[in-house]
């Protein structure tokens, strides 16, 4: 049984050229820029009073969702956490639909039924999260269970935070996945704080070290390096598809904004923020792209234009019709069955595999 | 047609659904080779194998949560809680994940959760509860509670075929006590009420095991003509059948085995107050378990559960009103 547990962050310059083409590496940067740009736009809309409720973002954590989702095939299935907007973008959700979602508009993924990043577009293989964390670990394990029972070469992946590891569902999901040897990947997004509570007040033993006790590997990667996160996830997916069971990946990162828009995170020492600012994941991938000869300015302009167009589209869309507030509580018996559809899998390795 | 106990009818319904549709699987604690705590899945492991008759870890949240995941990728899981009381440990997955998924995300969750419920045999505070009202209050869940073998089979098959999460209450005290004719093969019992006995002087409105208590209590009630309405389904609640019973009888006794406050019967009483007031010829009367945990010792338990005598007394008082 594989029970190796490693706390050493993977080398940021790990040799991933074997699995990532030039276009893949630019793609990772593009999705991270898109995620950050959409969230910055949404924050500005929030401050203008156009986003009701609160607003949560993943500033500084872009590499975790982008790197992991990039390693997933179209037929894989995902449960995405609220700081992982990049995963939705990779699966194929349009920026205008995301901005509409934040603003509670009819064209949002949930049509105004739920807010902020509480969505999952089932048409692209994603199940929307709930606020009780990490409930989706069990849903992801259940999808993986179905794949295994049917003998399908696919896997499920879910993200969850350090705070989630204190709840019972973390244990139940880890245990279930381990005992059944499920093709599931658990990405523990350790951003150092559960709201205001630092990890030292949350657990005595780092959760990644618990993986061995459940009978499968746990490893830590530099969560601010999209290529390191990609590579760890790619390898975990390979294990899952080969029938070797689950993997826990701890992506070590930092929540660079407050828990939500209202939170000035005065409880975080400024040195800690500065230390992590120097490790910004986008800066890191941008430097790589520059070294590859990519016109990064042009890429940023392209992303900005796309977001501006999406914001215009979202702002011109209607709010939901109040008369529909009690609709769709139950699915009619005679209606068509709705199942999760396939998403986008932009990694070149999938194209190579299909060829 | 075959004569079956309530328990045999549940097994027959489950077996029929599994033979008809290979997407249907059952998951729960000790349901495999052991056949389940009450033997509902006795012989299933041999017929369908370990993959479709899945022994799970002792983890109710995981049973419901993984069932949700399996359902949205195309399986039809039927979860067994060993006792309905233990659903408290899976409450979050059922109420927050399964119940709200379609409304929020447009994604139906086709799971059925079987809850062996009810008291009457010294099960004590953690093996006797009737938690159906918890789920009536949680939008997005259907809640059914059959009282006869025929309905037990038909409602289980209908629940498994229903694309929504269905909470299926099966009363343990009916398992081997109630027997009846059950049609062969697959059939569905609608999620609506059934008149268990016609009558015109007074209507007893109830469901589950209390249907039998009500029938016995009113079998010979000084010559009064007493209707017994078996709700069968609590969500959806058959409001028209309830109001029709009020129109016919003008006097209503509502019986719950559950704790009184906010029980299913409270909703029935509220409905009658709102929409049946003009048809009433006496106060709506309720018989239910007082708001205490179900005690263990027989004299204590019998003191709280609605008995034939208590129902009889309530009916007599109302008839005399």
Image (cartoon, coloured by chain):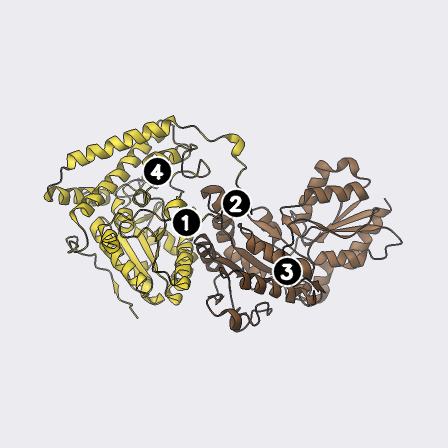
Chain colours: A yellow, B brown
Q: Locate residue A298 relative to residue A344 in the image: left or right.
A: left
Q: Position of residue A297 (x, y in %)?
A: 15, 34
Helix, strand or loop at mark 1: loop
The residue at the point 89 percent across, 54 percent down is B222
- Say left or right for A177 vs B103: left
Expressed as whole percent of the image width and height from the top left, the position of residue B31 reads: 53, 68
Task: Please say whether residue B77 is visible from this viewpoint.
Answer: yes
- Residue on which the image places disc 2: A335
The image quadrant of residue A145 is bottom left
CB atoms at circles 4 and 3 under 8 Å apart? no
Reply above or below: B251 against B84.
above
Helix or strand or loop: what does disc 3 sit on?
helix
| Location of mark 3 (residue) | B153
Q: Are marks 1 and 4 on the same chain?
A: yes
CA separation in Å, label 2 and label 1: 16 Å
Q: Look at discs 1 and 4 and give the one toward the viewer.
A: 1
- Residue marked by disc 4: A263
Identify the chain of the residue marked 3, using the numbered disc in the image: B
Return the disc, 2 or 4, that comes first in the chain's sequence: 4
Disc on the earlier residue, 1 or 4: 4
- Crowd tier of the residue under label 2, counting other residues whose Cα lies within 10 Å: few below 14, some 14–19, many 20 or above: few
């Amino acid at each position: 049984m594989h029970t190796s547990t490693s706390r050493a962050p993977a080398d940021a310059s790990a040799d991933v050229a074997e699995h990532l083409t030039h276009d893949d590496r630019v793609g990772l940067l593009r999705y991270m820029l898109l995620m950050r740009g959409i969230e910055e736009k949404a924050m500005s809309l929030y401050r203008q009073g156009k986003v009701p409720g609160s607003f949560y973002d993943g500033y500084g954590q872009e590499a975790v969702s982008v790197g992991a989702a990039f390693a997933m095939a179209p037929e894989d299935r995902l449960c995405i956490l609220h700081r992982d907007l990049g995963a939705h973008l990779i699966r194929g959700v349009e920026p205008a639909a995301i901005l509409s979602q934040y603003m509670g508009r009819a064209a949002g993924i949930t049509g105004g039924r739920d807010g902020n990043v509480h969505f999952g577009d089932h048409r692209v293989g994603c199940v929307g999260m709930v606020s009780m964390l990490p409930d989706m670990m069990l849903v992801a394990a259940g999808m993986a269970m179905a794949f295994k029972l049917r003998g399908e070469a696919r896997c499920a992946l879910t993200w969850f935070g350090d705070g989630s590891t204190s709840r019972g569902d973390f244990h139940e999901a880890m245990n279930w996945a381990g005992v059944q040897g499920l093709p599931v990947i658990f990405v523990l997004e350790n951003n150092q704080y559960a709201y205001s509570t630092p990890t030292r007040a949350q657990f005595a033993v780092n959760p990644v070290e618990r993986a061995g006790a459940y009978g499968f590997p746990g490893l830590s990667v530099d969560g601010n390096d999209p290529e390191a996160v990609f590579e760890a996830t790619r390898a975990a997916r390979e294990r899952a598809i080969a029938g070797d069971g689950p993997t826990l990946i701890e992506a070590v990162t930092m929540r660079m904004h407050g828990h939500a828009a209202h939170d000035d995170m005065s409880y975080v020492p400024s040195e800690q923020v500065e230390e992590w600012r120097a490790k910004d994941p986008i800066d890191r991938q941008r430097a790589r792209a520059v070294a590859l000869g990519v016109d990064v300015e042009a890429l940023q302009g392209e992303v900005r234009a796309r977001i501006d167009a999406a914001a215009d589209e979202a702002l011109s869309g209607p709010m939901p019709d109040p008369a529909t507030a009690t609709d769709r509580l139950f699915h009619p018996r005679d209606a068509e069955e709705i199942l999760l559809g396939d998403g986008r899998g932009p990694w070149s390795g999938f194209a190579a595999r299909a060829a | 047609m075959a004569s079956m106990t309530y328990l045999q009818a549940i097994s027959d319904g489950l077996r029929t659904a599994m033979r008809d549709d290979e997407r249907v699987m059952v998951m729960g604690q000790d349901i495999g080779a052991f056949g389940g705590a009450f033997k509902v899945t006795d012989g299933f492991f041999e017929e369908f194998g370990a993959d479709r008759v899945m022994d799970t870890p002792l983890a109710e949240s995981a049973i419901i949560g993984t069932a949700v995941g399996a359902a949205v990728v195309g399986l039809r899981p039927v979860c067994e809680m060993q006792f309905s009381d233990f659903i408290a440990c899976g409450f979050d997955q059922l109420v927050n994940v399964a119940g709200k998924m379609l409304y929020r995300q447009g994604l139906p969750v086709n799971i059925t959760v079987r809850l062996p419920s009810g008291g009457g045999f010294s099960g004590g505070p953690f093996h006797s509860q009737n938690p159906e009202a918890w789920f009536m209050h949680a939008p997005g869940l259907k809640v059914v509670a059959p009282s006869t073998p025929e309905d037990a089979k038909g409602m289980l098959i209908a629940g498994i075929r229903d694309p929504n999460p269905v909470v299926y209450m099966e009363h343990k005290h009916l398992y081997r006590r109630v027997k009846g004719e059950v049609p062969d093969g697959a059939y569905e019992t609608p999620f609506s009420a059934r008149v268990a006995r016609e009558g015109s002087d007074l209507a007893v409105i109830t469901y589950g095991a209390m249907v039998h208590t009500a029938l016995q209590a009113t079998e010979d009630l000084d010559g009064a003509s007493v209707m017994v309405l078996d709700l069968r389904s609590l969500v959806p609640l058959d409001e028209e059948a309830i109001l029709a019973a009020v129109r016919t009888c003008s006097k209503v006794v509502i019986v719950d085995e559950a704790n009184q406050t906010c029980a299913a019967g409270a909703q029935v009483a509220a409905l009658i107050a709102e929409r049946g007031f003009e048809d009433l010829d006496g106060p709506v009367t309720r018989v239910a378990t007082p708001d205490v945990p179900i005690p263990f010792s027989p004299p204590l338990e019998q003191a709280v559960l609605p008995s034939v005598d208590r129902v009889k007394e309530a009916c007599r008082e109302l008839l005399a009103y």
